[in-house]
Image (cartoon, rainbow, N blue to C red):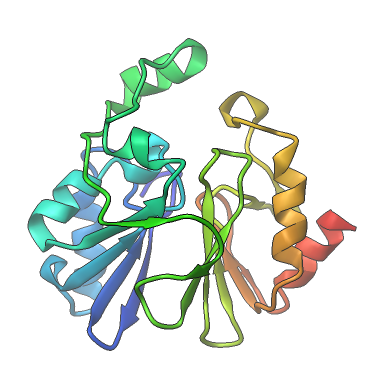
């Protein structure tokens, strides 16, 4: 979806979507589902990593078309559902003018920390820094697949992190990466940058070093 990634996970009873990408780009999700011989109505859960518009922009349309339950951390919920949204300032105001403001959407399942999600086999890991409620997700499949969101990004040879201007608490970022480095996963995918396959956790351990 342009420079940002959303991810589809096929499960026994349908499809799980991790993030929804940019506003007005949900047609790309539909095309990806078609390639998997699936339909938007089969999306039963949307796991959100954080509230930024390039990750929740398509949420309203996806929920309307699928009826999927929406899952997010409690600290990001006020921005997602509009109850605590404030007008952006500085560079974030420019970003919103370009991307458009995501519509407010109700969060159905609120996370408060690490632990199971409503989807069997997927665990939530609270990884604050980029936003207060930023959450990564670990899929218990194929040696472990980490959906890192913007806790880190996939660089050519090493992990990268989001620019400080877009990060709420930069001091928390290395702590969250260190936390992820203590898990077991073979593959890591990101909101931005290349996926890492084969011993992906080692990239996180090298960063946390």
Q: Where is residue 83 in the image (x, y as percent from the top left)?
A: 28, 30
Q: Position of residue 150 (x, y in %)?
A: 56, 47
Examine the rendered structure and indicate whether residue 7 appears above or below residue 27: below
Examine the rendered structure and indicate whether residue 122 appears above or below residue 196: below
Examine the rendered structure and indicate whether residue 101 appears above or below residue 68: above
Report the side of 1 relative to 164 (left or right).
Answer: left
Q: Can residue 108 be seen at all in this image of the molecule? A: yes
Q: Can residue 157 be seen at all in this image of the molecule? A: no
Q: Residue at x 68, y 52 (%)?
A: 155
Q: Which residue is drawn at 28% across and 88% down?
A: 12
Q: Position of residue 10 (x, y in %)?
A: 32, 80
Q: Residue at x 57, y 69 (%)?
A: 146
* Quarter in which the C terminus is drawn: bottom right
**Residue that sits furthest to the right in the current view:** 209
Examine the rendered structure and indicate whether residue 142 appears above or below residue 78: below
In which image quadrant can residue 9 be found?
bottom left
Which one is in front, 152 or 158?
A: 152
Report the side of 199 relative to 194 (left or right).
Answer: right
Which one is in front, 133 or 98?
A: 133
Which one is in front, 171 or 75?
A: 75
Q: Position of residue 81 (x, y in %)?
A: 27, 38
Which one is in front, 165 or 174?
A: 174
**Residue that sits furthest to the top in the current view:** 90
Numbered circles on residues, count: 0
């Amino acid at each position: 979806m342009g420079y940002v990634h959303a991810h589809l996970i096929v499960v026994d009873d349908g499809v799980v979507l991790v993030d929804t990408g940019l506003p007005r780009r949900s047609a790309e999700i539909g095309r990806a589902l078609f390639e998997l011989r699936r339909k938007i109505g089969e999306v039963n859960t949307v796991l959100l990593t954080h509230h930024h518009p390039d990750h929740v922009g398509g949420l309203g349309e996806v929920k309307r078309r699928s009826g999927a339950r929406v899952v997010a951390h409690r600290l990001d919920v006020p921005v997602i559902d509009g109850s605590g949204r404030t007008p952006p300032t500085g560079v974030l105001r420019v970003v919103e003018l370009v991307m458009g403001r995501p519509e407010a959407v109700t969060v159905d399942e609120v996370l408060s920390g690490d632990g199971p999600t409503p989807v069997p086999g997927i665990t939530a890991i609270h990884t604050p820094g980029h936003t207060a409620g930023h959450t990564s997700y670990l899929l218990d499949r194929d040696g472990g697949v980490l959906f890192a969101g913007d806790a880190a990004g996939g660089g050519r040879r090493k992990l990268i992190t989001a620019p400080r201007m877009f990060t709420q608490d930069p001091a928390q970022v290395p702590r969250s990466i260190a936390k992820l480095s203590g898990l077991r996963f073979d593959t890591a995918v990101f909101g931005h940058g290349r996926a890492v396959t084969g011993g992906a956790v080692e990239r996180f351990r090298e960063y946390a070093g």
